[in-house]
């Protein structure tokens, strides 16, 4: 009798445990996370932190491996979305600059002089505009979880201080990707050159290009000042937002509890990553600006009035891309920025 009772109890426990085992068996041994660049680039730091947090929260059940430098797509970060649909990539921390060729609405963050400061950026990602952009992402077979930030892109060059559009005339300026950037610099009288970050350093050293645009902290981290870049203009002409997201098919394979963990950890990693990206460049803490000066760089901090001159000069580019992005979306963005506190 006792043996029969034990058998029934064991069978009952087994039947209760079976669903949990089944769910566990649907997990992959490794979830591939693609990110542009490598540490210490802020977006890459965010990707590694996300994977670390997920490991902690799931006690290793969900194993996320970060592949920096967009290595899963041969270094071409603009192919990450396609690779997610194909099942090559499971998760990504993407730059909006790199996905805007596939999702035109993401070009919003690249509109020249749309966002004057970080509060304007926050008004977009934390409000209706950010939610609307996430809905657009969801139509592309990916599930966005959190907004990150690579930073405002500032201008450096080897020739002269830049405080007005005429100062850019004839300068060869490297940009990462996206036709809008070529149009911005052409309109300002410069000669834009598209180039990968890997090719940028030798190009600056040899004088093949005169300047480049990147966030201040990346300028310092990669010691771009040692590559003849002695002039830095802080003009906040556009920002590079980041998105933590998961391929839709992969997302749907997770339990409700695991989805919540992935979302919570993405948001935490994004908050930490944004704070890191802004360190030393927002008053009263301008330690990064001071570090650039101490490294022998002449820093130009443009006034609102000086930025307005550049904004007026690039208005034709703004209006052209506003039509492509969607005038309603741009209007919502402008309204949110005007109402920022």
Image (cartoon, rainbow, N blue to C red):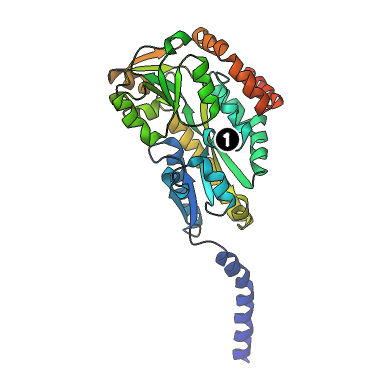
Image coords of residue 306 (percent x, y): 49, 8
Residue 68 lies left or right of residue 79; in this view the side is: left
Q: Given the current orientation, which residue lies at the most extreme right position?
A: 328
Residue 44 seen in this snapshot:
yes
Count of labels shown? 1
Image coords of residue 226 (percent x, y): 28, 25
Decide which of 301, 126 is in the foreground and name it.
301
Name the residue: 57% across, 47% down.
82
**Badge 1 local density, few (<14 within 10 Å), some, or many (20+)?**
some
Decide which of 108, 178 is in the foreground and name it.
178
Q: Quadrant of the C terminus?
A: top right
Residue 332 in which image quadrant: top right
Residue 296 in which image quadrant: top left
Task: Decide: is 69 above or below 338.
Answer: below
In the picture of the structure, the residue carrying the numbered disc 1 is 101
Image coords of residue 263 (percent x, y): 58, 46
Residue 153 lies left or right of residue 311; in this view the side is: left
Residue 282 seen in this snapshot:
no
Name the residue: 40% across, 13% down.
300
Task: Decide: is 183 above or below 76.
Answer: above
Name the residue: 46% across, 23% down.
192
Decide which of 279, 317 is in the foreground and name it.
317
Decide which of 255, 173 is in the foreground and name it.
173
Image coords of residue 307 (percent x, y): 51, 12
Q: Secondary structure at mark 1?
A: loop
Q: Given the current orientation, which residue lies at the most extreme bottom position?
A: 1
Q: Quadrant of the N terminus?
A: bottom right
């Amino acid at each position: 009798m006792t043996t029969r009772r034990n058998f029934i109890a064991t069978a009952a426990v087994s039947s209760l445990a079976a669903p949990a085992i089944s769910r566990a068996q649907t997990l992959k041994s490794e979830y591939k996370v693609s990110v542009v660049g490598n540490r210490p680039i802020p977006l890459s730091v965010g990707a590694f932190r996300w994977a670390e947090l997920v490991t902690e929260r799931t006690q290793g059940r969900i194993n996320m491996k970060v592949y920096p430098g967009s290595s899963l797509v041969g270094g071409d970060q603009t192919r990450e979305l396609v690779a997610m649909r194909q099942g090559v990539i499971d998760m990504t921390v993407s730059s909006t600059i790199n996905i805007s060729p596939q999702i035109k609405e993401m070009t919003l963050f690249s509109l020249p002089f749309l966002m004057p400061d970080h509060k304007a950026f926050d008004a977009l990602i934390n409000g209706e505009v950010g939610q609307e952009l996430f809905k657009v992402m969801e139509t592309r077979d990916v599930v966005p979880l959190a907004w990150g930030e690579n930073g405002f892109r500032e201008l450096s060059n080897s020739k002269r201080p830049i405080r007005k559009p005429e100062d850019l005339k004839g300068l060869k300026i490297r940009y990462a990707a996206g036709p809008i950037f070529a149009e911005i610099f052409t309109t300002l009288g410069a000669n834009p050159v598209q180039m990968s970050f890997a090719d940028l350093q030798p190009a600056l050293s040899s004088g093949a290009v005169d300047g480049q645009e990147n966030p201040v902290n990346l300028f310092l981290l990669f010691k771009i000042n040692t590559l003849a870049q002695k002039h830095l203009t802080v003009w906040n002409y556009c920002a590079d937002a980041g998105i933590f997201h998961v391929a839709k098919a992969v997302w749907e394979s997770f339990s409700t509890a695991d989805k919540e963990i992935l979302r919570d950890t993405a948001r935490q990693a994004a908050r930490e990553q944004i704070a890191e990206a802004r360190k030393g460049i927002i008053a009263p803490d301008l330690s990064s600006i001071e570090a650039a000066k101490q490294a022998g760089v002449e820093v130009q901090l443009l006034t609102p009035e000086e930025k307005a001159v550049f904004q007026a000069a690039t208005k034709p580019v703004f209006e052209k891309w506003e039509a492509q992005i969607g005038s309603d979306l741009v209007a919502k963005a402008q309204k949110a920025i005007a109402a920022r506190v």
